[in-house]
Image: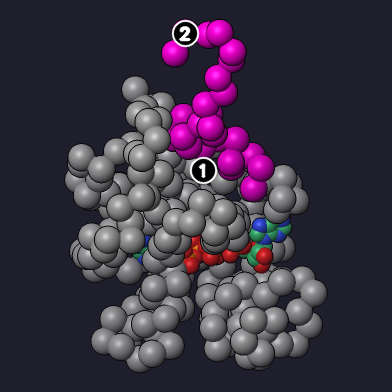
């Protein structure tokens, strides 16, 4: 049974192929719930941008569309989930991505409450179109909004293609997704907190579906209790 008592942590994991909208929806959900959004792709891209040893080691792997090793990713996420800001919960985007990572996450979550797993489903032709069209800010790294034409609406940086969004690399990322990541959908599918949602809809509709899916999994504490006059408490 899922524990929905107020005060319980709201732990959310986003699954889905490249371009499904995990980052977009994780950001929205984390903001509305005042939770930290933990994106392993963002952590790695920041490390590349800052030329840290992790960034130097991960760059070529990411540019080929392959996965960084389980050992490195599990250590990064283990450290991040150990920080105090995750005590009320978190929204995890991009991890787990392999069955060993999913097993490691189960270990990290022992005694920390249930995890809602939301799988965003989008057809491949739509993913290819989205990733070909995507621009990000070359400085702060966020996805460009449709209305931004040449520069970032947040920091003014120039808009660029993500280095792994070229056609050949995107196809490799999709192959890697099917081979290494899709099996974790089966790993989670039997759990009561697993929900699949249709991601091939306008972003606001997907946001509402995600919110409903997590509520349905009874992870969001109900609003203020309504007291009916005369009812026994
Ligand atoms: P990561 O950054 O996680 O990339 P990804 O999984 O390929 O996902 P994307 O960021 O491409 O897509 P998304 O689903 O977040 O969609 P988004 O919201 O951006 O990982 C990058 C690399 O890092 C990996 O390839 C790997 O090398 C490494 N890595 C990361 N984590 C790892 C791990 N755990 N283990 C090993 N290696 C790891 O949306 C995409 C576009 O579509 C945007 O332009 C957006 O505006 C648009 N869009 C979103 N929603 C909609 C909608 N509903 N309708 C129309 N357009 C939409």
Main secondary-structure element of the magenta-colored stretch:
loop
Residue 119 image label: 1
Q: Is residue 161 above or below residue 213?
A: below
Q: Residue at x 44, y 69 (%)?
A: 41
Label 2: which residue?
232
Q: Would the CB of label 2 be found within 8 Å of ligand 1? A: no
Q: Is residue 203 magenta?
A: no
Question: Quadrant where the N terminus lies?
Answer: top left
Tell me if residue 159 can be seen.
no
Query: How far apart are labels 2 and 1 at the CA level?
Result: 41 Å
Q: Is residue 45 above or below residue 37?
A: below
Front residue (pair 64, 98): 98
Q: Is residue 232 magenta?
A: yes
Residue 186: name its quadrant.
top left
- Residue 145 x %, y %: 71, 72
Earlier-in-chain disc, 2 versus 1: 1
In the picture provided, is 9 more to the left or to the right than 31? left
- Residue 31 x %, y %: 54, 59
Q: Residue at x 47, y 8 (%)?
A: 232
As helix, strand or loop, the secondary structure at mark 2 comes to loop
Residue 192: name its quadrant.
top left
In the picture provided, is 29 more to the left or to the right than 40? right
- Residue 42 x %, y %: 45, 72
In front: label 2 or label 1: 2
Q: Is residue 207 above or below residue 144?
A: above
Q: Residue at x 53, y 72 (%)?
A: 169
Please report the bounds of the magenta region as a residue range: 207-233
Q: Characterize the local packing of mark 2: few (<14), some (14-19) or many (20 or more) Cα atoms within 10 angstroms.
A: few
């Amino acid at each position: 049974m899922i524990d929905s008592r107020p005060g319980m942590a709201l732990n959310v994991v986003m699954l889905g192929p490249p371009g499904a909208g995990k980052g977009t929806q994780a950001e929205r959900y984390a903001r509305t719930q005042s939770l930290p959004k933990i994106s392993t792709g963002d952590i790695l891209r920041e490390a590349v941008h800052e030329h840290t040893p992790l960034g130097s080691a991960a760059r070529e792997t990411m540019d080929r569309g392959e996965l960084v090793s389980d050992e490195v990713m599990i250590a990064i996420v283990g450290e991040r989930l150990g920080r105090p800001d995750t005590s009320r919960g978190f929204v995890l985007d991009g991890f787990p991505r392999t069955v060993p990572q999913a097993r490691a996450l189960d270990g990290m979550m022992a005694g920390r409450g249930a995890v809602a797993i939301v799988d965003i489903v989008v057809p491949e032709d739509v993913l290819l179109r989205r990733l070909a069209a995507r621009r990000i800010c070359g400085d702060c790294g966020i996805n460009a909004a449709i209305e931004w034409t040449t520069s970032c609406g947040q920091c003014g940086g120039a808009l660029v293609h993500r280095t792994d969004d070229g056609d050949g690399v995107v196809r490799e990322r999709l192959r890697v997704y099917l081979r290494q990541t899709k099996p974790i959908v089966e790993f989670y599918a039997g759990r009561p907190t697993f929900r699949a949602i249709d991601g091939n809809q306008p972003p606001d509709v997907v946001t509402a579906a995600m919110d409903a899916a997590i509520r349905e999994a009874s992870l969001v504490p109900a609003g203020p209790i309504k007291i009916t006059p005369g009812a026994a408490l």
